[in-house]
Amino acid sequence: MNENLDINLNDVTDGGEPPTDLVGMVSLLGALSDAEREAVLPGFEARVALLTQPRGPASGVIGEELSTRRFVVHAAESVAERTRGRSVTGRPFQMRMAAAVALLGTVLATLVATRAALGPQGGTTGTLAAVTGDAAELERDVERWLSVYAAFDGDSASDLATIFDDAGTLGDHVSSRESSDSEWLEESL
Amino acid sequence: MTSESGFQGLPADHLPTDDLAPILVRAVAGDGAAWRTVVDRYGRRLFAVARSRCRDAEVAEDITQSVFATVAAKLSAGEYTEQGKFESWLFRVAMNRIRDHIRRVRRQPVAANSEIVAEAAEQRAVGDRERPDETSLERLREAVEGLSDSDREVIELRHHGGMSFKKMAEVLNEPMGTLLARHHRALRKLKERLETHEPAELPGKTGGTAKRFVGEGRIK
């Protein structure tokens, strides 16, 4: 007889008695189930019941309290759901780094655009004058960026000062390179 | 362990279910004691299924709370009327929530697995101190983890969830005969794994205990 047929299919309640050689297995699973159920943290039922109780008909303060508590619990669950498994430590630093990269990218893009607009026809004097003018404008832009960003994160002052210095250095470096006609022409050609 | 309702530890089929409808009505009306009765009746069974899959008591409690919160919201909104399907509905919500969790964990394999392994090791250490036969149970947990998802769900719903095959058929949307056969096959796989791999996998431990119990049916 096929052992797989040794099951009472008419018994919808418990699936019939297991074969004798599986009785021990079923018993062991029963012990495991008991262990899993006993693994609850203290106050499990009370906590779950309190935090999930259905909203009854509006009944004054008690009803409002329950509703508020549920909202808080659900909101917390929602946040936990969104953040579970993801590290939240170091995010302010990551945000500052992202802002710094974006800022430097903006500065570079503006400088490159300026160079492309002037081109080799601008000549040394014209290029230097244009870059000097743009540098002053860039500094104002950077200051505006810094003031806006500082409003969002007061702890980033030192980082932003570094970024500002780097941006200034980069501007100087670009200006000094602009003084070389031959280099500019080589790159353009 | 038995909770205030006295239902825990009893097979699901011995739980009184005829009285559930009026209890749910009272719970939806704001009767905290009635809702507590519902939680007492099903909470640990849901928890056990979730913990078996997640191996983490806190995550299992989160899932259990989430399931009850969802069910409570739907009851309050009048989206469910008790017609003898509450248990199936509750466990279907739970299984969906557990599957969602497993999908999330699998998307982060390195961090999640290391956390689970660390948690399991920690619980194992605690269990070794508190429960004499924890080694046998841990072997069985590992064997259950080695089953396919479909076999594992049947084992977990049947034993940890304490569900009848009829209810399981409603939860899993499968014919009852299929689930009976799958359950039988899964039991055989577990038995074979415990008997075949036990000594090699756990050298130096109190090997042979689970094998002896499985073979002789001497548990409890």
Image: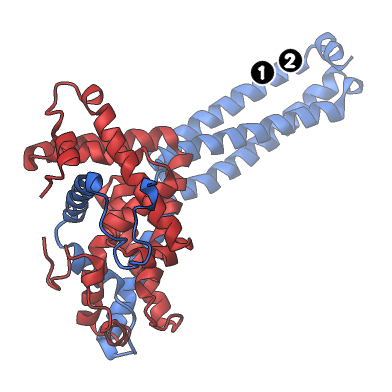
Q: What residue is shown with label 2?
A: A177
The image shows residue A121, relative to residue A78, as above or below, that is above
Percent x, y for residue A99? 55, 39
Name the foreground residue: B190 vs B65: B190
Three-letter code, disc 2: Arg
Chain ID for label 2? Answer: A
The image shows residue B219, relative to residue B74, as above or below, that is above
Name the foreground residue: A120 vs A38: A38
The image shows residue B1, relative to residue A97, as above or below, that is below
Name the foreground residue: A90 vs B167: B167
Hue used for the chain lettered B: red
Quadrant housing the N terminus of chain B: bottom left
Q: What residue is shown with label 1?
A: A173
Three-letter code, disc 1: His
Percent x, y for residue A165? 54, 27
Percent x, y for residue B30? 28, 85
Q: Quadrant of residue B21?
A: bottom left
Secondary structure at badge 2 equals helix
Q: Are marks 2 and 1 in contact (CB under 8 Å)?
A: yes
- Label 2: how many residues lie within 10 Å, few (<14), some (14-19) or many (20+)? few
CA gap between label 2 and label 1 equals 6 Å
- Label 1: how many residues lie within 10 Å, few (<14), some (14-19) or many (20+)? few
> Which residue: 64% across, 40% down?
A140
* Residue B199 seen in the figure: yes
> Which residue: 7% across, 38% down?
B129
Q: Quadrant of residue B136?
A: top left
Secondary structure at badge 1 equals helix
In the image: residue B35, left or right of residue B89: left
Hue used for the chain lettered A: blue
* Residue B97 seen in the figure: no
